[in-house]
Image (cartoon, grey):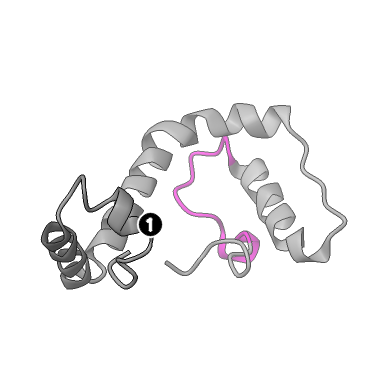
C-alpha cells in the first residue's frame, strides 16, 4: 500500500491512519528481520506441544489418510510413522524409522 498510495489505499486506509505511522510500522517490521518469523515458529511449537499434540492420537485413530498423488506420498508415509509412535513415550523417533521430512515439513 505504501508503494501505490494513490490507489484505493489513499481513499480507505489513510483517512483512518496517517501515512507516516504506516511507514514507521513497515520500517519496524523490516528492522526486526527474522524475529517476527521466529516468534511465529515459537507460537506454533507451543500450540502443538500444549494443544494439538493432545488431540493427535484421537485424530489419527479416527481418520484414514490416502492419496494417489505421488507428490503427497511423503506426507502419507510421515503420518504412518507418526501413527505408529503416537502413543509411545519415546522423545525421538528411531533413526532407522524416522518419518520423511523433506517435502513434508518446511525447513523453517
Picture residue at 20% right of the left edge, 45% below the top: 16
Q: Is residue 107 left or right of residue 96?
A: left
Q: Is residue 71 left or right of residue 86?
A: right
Picture residue at 83% right of the left edge, 52% below the top: 67
Q: Main secondary structure of the magenta part?
A: loop
Picture residue at 43% right of the left edge, 41% below the top: 48
Q: Position of residue 36 (x, y in %)?
A: 26, 60
Q: Nearer the viewer, residue 69 or 95?
A: 69
Picture residue at 38% right of the left edge, 47% below the top: 44
Q: Which residues are magenta?
A: 86-99
Q: Position of residue 17 (x, y in %)?
A: 17, 49
Please check the rendered image and state whether residue 63 is part of the magenta-colored stretch, yes or no: no
* Secondary element type, mark 1: helix
Q: Quadrant of the C terminus?
A: bottom left
Q: Is residue 42 above or below residue 102?
A: above
Q: Which residue is mark 1?
A: 8
Q: Nearer the viewer, residue 19 or 37?
A: 19
Amino acid at each position: 500500500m505504501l508503494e501505490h498510495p494513490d490507489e484505493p489505499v489513499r481513499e480507505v486506509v489513510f483517512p483512518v491512519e496517517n501515512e507516516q505511522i504506516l511507514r514507521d510500522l513497515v520500517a519496524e517490521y523490516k528492522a526486526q528481520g527474522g524475529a517476527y518469523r521466529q516468534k511465529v515458529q515459537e507460537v506454533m511449537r507451543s500450540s502443538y506441544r500444549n494443544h494439538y499434540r493432545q488431540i493427535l492420537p484421537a485424530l489419527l485413530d479416527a481418520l484414514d489418510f490416502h492419496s494417489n498423488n505421488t507428490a503427497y506420498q511423503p506426507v502419507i508415509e510421515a503420518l504412518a510413522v507418526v501413527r505408529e509412535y503416537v502413543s509411545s513415550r519415546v522423545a525421538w523417533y528411531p533413526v532407522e524409522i524416522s518419518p520423511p521430512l523433506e517435502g513434508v515439513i518446511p525447513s523453517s
